[in-house]
């Protein structure tokens, strides 16, 4: 008949198992460090065109579609146009800053 393990024996057994697991992890870590697997390259983030851009005021409808645009110094005209379109069509129009490629 098997004897019951004492607490000291159980603790030693658990410590030995933990040491063996730690040693296996270390060996695996060292093996991977020695032979790194090639990783797939990530696609480069798309950047803006290298050309110059200019800021404009964009008048947009509720869906966000651009209705018209005005040069940056003409903000008042753009807001007036958005207000006129909103009254005329009874739908909301708003003004935002946008970047257009410089010509």
Image: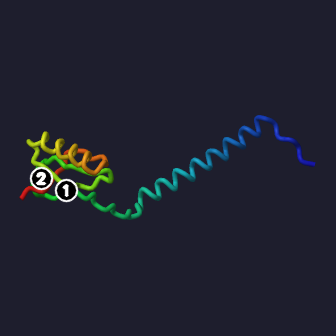
Q: Nearer the viewer, residue 90 or 28?
A: 90
Q: Between disc 2 and disc 1, whose residue precedes?
A: 1
Q: Foreground mark, 2 or 1?
A: 2
- Image location (x, y in percent) of residue 37: 41, 63
Q: Which residue is disc 1 drawn over?
A: 48
Q: Nearer the viewer, residue 38 or 28?
A: 38
- Image location (x, y in percent) of residue 63: 32, 53
Structural crowding at the residue carrying mark 2, measured as other residues with C-alpha within 10 Å and reported as few (<14), some (14–19) or many (≥20): some
Can you say whether 54 is above or below 9 in the image?
below
Q: Which mark is residue 53?
A: 2
Residue found at the far right of this picture: 1
Q: Left or right: where does residue 81 sit relative to residue 103?
A: right
- Image location (x, y in percent) of residue 20: 62, 49
Q: Nearer the viewer, residue 73 or 27?
A: 73
- Image location (x, y in percent) of residue 95: 22, 44
Can you say whether 34 is above or below 26 in the image?
below
């Amino acid at each position: 008949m098997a004897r019951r393990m004492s607490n000291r024996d159980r603790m030693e057994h658990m410590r030995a198992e933990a040491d063996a697991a730690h040693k296996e992890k270390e060996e695996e870590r060292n093996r991977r460090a020695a032979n790194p697997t090639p990783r797939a390259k990530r696609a480069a983030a798309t950047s803006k065109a290298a050309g110059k851009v200019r800021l404009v005021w964009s008048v947009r409808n509720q869906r966000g579609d651009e209705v018209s645009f005005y040069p940056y110094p003409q903000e008042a005209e753009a807001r007036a146009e958005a207000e006129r379109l909103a009254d005329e069509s009874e739908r909301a129009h708003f003004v935002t800053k946008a970047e257009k490629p410089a010509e």
